[in-house]
Amino acid sequence: MELPVQFEKEMKSLLGEEYSSWLQSFEKENTCFRGLRVNTMKISPMEFSRKSSFALRPVPWTGKGFYLEGEEKASRHPYYAAGLYYLQEPSAMTPAAALPVEKGDRVLDLCAAPGGKATELAARLEGTGLLVANDLSNSRAKALLKNLELFGAGNILVTSESPEKLNTWFEGFFDKILIDAPCSGEGMFRKEPSMMRDWEEKGPDYYRQIQKEIVLQAARLLRPGGLLLYSTCTFSVKENEETLLTLLRSEYGFRMLPLALPEAVSEYGFAPGRPELISSEVKGEGLTEEEEKGLRLAVRLYPHRIEGEGHFAALLQKGEKVQEEKTPCRKKGKSGRQNSMAGGNLPESFREFTSLLKMSLDERRISFHDGRLYHLPEELAAENIRGLRFLRTGLYLGEIKGKHFEPSQALAMFLKKEEVKRVLDFPAEDERALRYLKGESLEVEDIADSEEKGWTLVCVDGFPLGWGKLADGRLKNKYYPGWRW
């Protein structure tokens, strides 16, 4: 592989004696690693490894990730459609694993598409608190929403806004923020050589300006004492240590922390940050002892040291100079719940459908908009976020069509088999599971009571795939058309 001359020069300076080993990692065949990360909202890693037919080997720094070996296409297995895992490059699993999210947290994934890190943050919240997943690109945010719904996340707000616009609603609101910043992508050259063209056209100088603007806006979104995880898939000191120095020298009182991983990062083969390579122009009169020591707590993932691609990650804590209680979502403008359906105003067809469920929804948090019903996160139930460009607020329950209610695909993925009274459960090896995912209607007389009819949750090995309508031993397919195989 022919690398850009200037890039090679910078890597020689960065790696020193390790440069030749790093260069050799580009020459080996089949050195790019595939991985999947288990969705712990649905299944434990141990149970998944027992059920799965894939050749798996644990990714040591995640606790939930596996190297996917062999040639089997994991994206074409019914378990993928059931949201049991997310396909993710092993190094890219690091940032979400290293941010210590706790139940009840308010979490922001600022550059979230396509959802690899956001889905893990949602799993860590276990249905509590609030996950705001944002991406400036509306088209990319649509892919993000699909992945979150596939995982069964309900306590979400999916937005497509600039960080500046988010600050008009959420300044000082979040407990934890993850920034997987847009970057020059140097760490992905081995896996995606086409990214070298973008590097030659733009390069680190272009991206570092964007990154500095993003992290300073994120600092405003974070509450005092909150944690921020910054990551990139690039090696450039300009985009990594120098961006962090901007935060450390900002008015927000940030300090560096070790990554919140099970073992010392050196145990995984991660390398420390390189503050000594920060340019004299950026560091000015020099780094303080605290700055230099702190920046070494950042980690660098190199493909010649680990089984994965290049990555960078660092954990920071905002200063607590200003003590303040957590406050509701704050906006410029009038607040108050819009189009509430609570208080006995829910459509009768929806009430009829909920008789099928063995779990209850908090009616105070159900809202109605454009014929659709949503179950809002508790953090947003009393808030008006009109004026903010968003794709989803909370769990989309379904749509009122005339006198009928049609449950959503998102609701099917959110539910568990045992929470629904009428279920059809296919083994993974039953070819009807694949036919269902293709949108076909199915003959199910062998597993369904001929007297049963109506909305039915369709599962594979006990994990929901979507809805169908049962009548006379036949299942009419209601799998969401946009997801069909």
Image: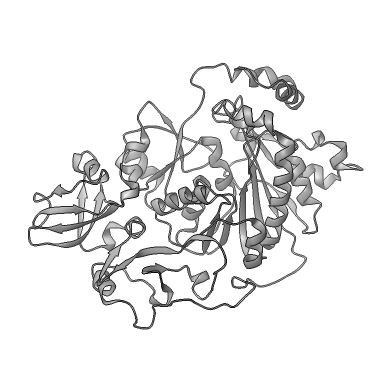
Q: Position of residue 196 (x, y in %)?
A: 62, 27
Q: Position of residue 56 (x, y in %)?
A: 40, 33
Say which residue appears at 31% left-offset and 52% top-offset: 480
Q: How is the image coloured?
A: one colour
Is residue 168 in view? yes
Say which residue appears at 78% left-offset and 51% top-offset: 248
Q: Position of residue 308 (x, y in %)?
A: 55, 30
Residue 9 vs residue 390, the one in the foreground: 390
Is residue 302 in view? no
In the picture provided, is 219 more to the left or to the right than 109? right
Is the N terminus in the top left, top right, bottom left or bottom right quadrant? top right
Residue 4 vs residue 64, the one in the foreground: 4
Q: Position of residue 277 (x, y in %)?
A: 80, 33
In the picture provided, is 425 more to the left or to the right than 320? left
Is the C terminus in the top left, top right, bottom left or bottom right quadrant? top left
Say which residue appears at 49% left-offset and 73% top-offset: 381
Relative to 27, say whether 40 is above or below. below
Quarter where residue 427 is shown: top left
